[in-house]
Amino acid sequence: MLEKPSKWRAGLIGGVVIGTISGIPGVSLINCCCCAGIWLGGMLSMYLYKTEVTPEMQPLESSDALILGLTSGIGGAFVATLLSVMILALFGPVEAELMRSIMERVLERLEEGGTLPSEVVDQMRDQLEESLRDSSSVSGILGNLFITLIVFPIFAILGALLGYAIFRPKNRPSMTQTT
Amino acid sequence: MARLLDKEGNSRDNCGTFRMRLADSTYRTLLLLVALWCAGIVAAPILTMYDLPFADALPSWYSPVCHQLAFKSFTFGGEPWGVCIRCSAIYFSFFAALLAYPFLQRRFLRRIPSTHWLILAVAPLGIDAVASLTSFYESTTLSRLVTGSLFGSMMPWFLLPPLTEGIAQLRHHFSKKGRSTLCSRSPVNGARG
């Protein structure tokens, strides 16, 4: 049986997708929906790898999903950080401004509707400003990279495992018969 | 009891025990990690309330995976949880399903479920979230809780079998001793159309 293809290509494409979704302002809102972008990246890497595996090769295994998820998650963390830094350097704090405008609208609506007392809204505004200031600093970027290097691989692995559950070979022979 | 030997001389019984032990330790580790993740969600408001160390750092761990909007989150003492209601429902129901997994798996399910179940789990959550995002309608606390719980409680059935199998395979690949093929793969998680 032929060896399986390298996982780098599929893993890195998954990583670029995760990084692009997470690093571009506005698009990163997809991750607010149960970090769907990271799940999708892991799943995509699994799908791409599955298309590379031919019937003459060793069958797809769940360990492939673990490695692909890990690769795409780590790649995604670096790509997202790189994109954020580039966007910050080229266009300024676009993401922070976008978040500020969205949050301002939400806070105004809450204040007008009387859902939250105005003191709480003011407190939330201060917290928001502080977190937006932190996100643009070097320590904020490095801290974010540290967190994403742990969180992204975990969720990308989950996505890749889900991808394996969907795309796995449907008629794999039982391994107990192979001895 | 008669024991069948594989090419390397390991008995099937030994391999079966090894595989079961590995699956057990994988399950326990996952359970512990999910418990810690869930504990962190509830600990975030408590730390903030009492101004304890890591009060600012803990919510940052959840920021890449959730919008953390206070008005869409459960609160404790006026402080929002680490993640929103929908995410809380997902993680806590995942934890509950993980706790129930060994009992239910033995009784009802021995393989990865069909993809139809996955669609059933994802579709309500997706519709509720996307419709809410596009202002088509405003999702309620109940809808977030129900759709999130449905998704979270289904996930262990899809994730745990390949995770256990995958870790066994990786262990086999990287093990210097090298165990038999029989030890590295689980027939439990085999194919199903």
Image (spheres, rainbow, N blue to C red):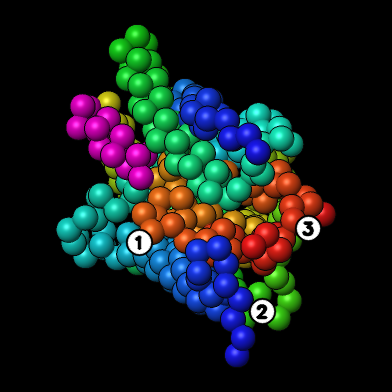
Would residue B24 be visible to someone looking at this image?
Answer: no
Would residue A43 be visible to someone looking at this image?
Answer: yes
* Mark 2: secondary structure: helix
Figure quadrant of the N terminus of chain A: top right
A167 and B122: which one is in front?
A: A167
B31 and B70: which one is in front?
A: B31
B162 and A84: which one is in front?
A: B162
**Magenta residues, start to end:** A137-150
Tell me the kind of residue under disc 2: Arg
Residue at 57% across, 30% down:
A5
Residue carrying label 1: B40
Residue carrying label 2: B106
Is disc 2 on the same chain as disc 1?
yes
The location of residue A51, given as percent across then percent down, is 69, 31
Q: Earlier in the sequence, mark 1 or mark 2?
A: 1
Residue at 62% across, 86% down:
B2
Residue carrying label 3: B192
Tell me the kind of residue under disc 1: Gly
The relative height of residue A44 versus residue B138 in the rendered view (above or below) is above
